[in-house]
Image: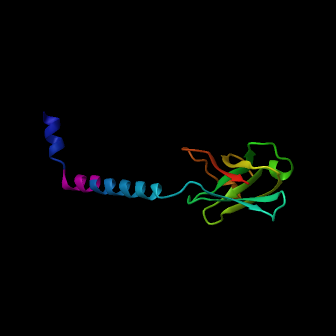
């Protein structure tokens, strides 16, 4: 009973400290929830009526820290050429990255662009990069007629 009595007699300074800590925690949580970990935009540009097309993937982030990303394409049918290229780059919030692939197909193809956040040295300046805890693989899918 004595300990309960001490809890109820908290000093005004302790109450003020608890209030400040609570407000600071709430503000920190609000700042992180509005950030987008990864934003992806996939465009497919077909050249005239030919079988050639260019796939453009733009990737950006709202995080203040940089990330090492690896971008590549997958499809529902086999495609040869630079379609199989994998790009590794440093992604920072003030510098979105664009990746290009040229491909040839004579049928409708479903293409998925995949971006993995990886741990690799020598990509970001001074090797300063983060790896998100929530997710490290992002994808977007579109069809090319």
Whether the magenta-drawn stretch holds residue 15 is answered as yes
Quarter of the figure that contains the C terminus: bottom right
Residue 9 horizontal side relative to residue 127, left or right: left
Q: Main secondary structure of the magenta part?
A: helix
- The reply to whether residue 123 is visible in this rendering is no
Whether the magenta-drawn stretch holds residue 115 is answered as no
Task: Using the rendered view, name the quadrant where residue 1 is placed.
Answer: top left
Task: Using the rendered view, name the quadrant where residue 43 is placed.
Answer: bottom right
Given residues 78 and 87, the one toward you in this image is 78
- The magenta span reads 11-18
Q: Residue furthest top?
A: 1
**Residue in the picture at 16% in, 37% down:** 4
Given residues 133 and 144, the one toward you in this image is 144
- The reply to whether residue 63 is visible in this rendering is yes
Q: How many marks?
A: 0
**Residue in the picture at 15% in, 46% down:** 9
Residue 22 horizontal side relative to residue 106, left or right: left
Given residues 144 and 115, the one toward you in this image is 144
**Residue in the picture at 63% in, 60% down:** 92
Q: How is the image coloured?
A: rainbow
Residue 60 point in image, percent of width and height: 62, 60
Residue 111 point in image, percent of width and height: 71, 49
Residue 21 horizontal side relative to residue 52, left or right: left
**Residue in the picture at 71% in, 61% down:** 98
Residue 123 point in image, percent of width and height: 73, 54
Q: Residue furthest right?
A: 81
């Amino acid at each position: 009973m004595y300990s309960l009595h001490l809890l109820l007699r908290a000093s005004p300074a302790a109450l003020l400290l608890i209030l400040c800590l609570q407000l600071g925690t709430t503000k920190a949580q609000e700042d992180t929830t509005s950030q987008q970990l990864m934003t992806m935009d996939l465009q497919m540009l077909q050249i005239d009526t030919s079988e050639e097309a260019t796939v453009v993937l733009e990737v950006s982030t709202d995080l203040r820290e940089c990330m090492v990303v690896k971008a590549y394409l997958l499809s529902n049918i086999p495609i040869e050429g630079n379609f199989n290229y994998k790009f590794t780059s440093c992604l920072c919030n003030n510098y979105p990255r664009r990746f290009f692939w040229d491909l040839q197909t004579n049928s409708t193809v479903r293409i998925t662009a995949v971006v993995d956040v990886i741990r690799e040295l020598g990509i970001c300046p001074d090797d300063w990069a983060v790896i998100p805890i929530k997710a490290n693989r992002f994808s977007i899918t579109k069809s090319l007629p």
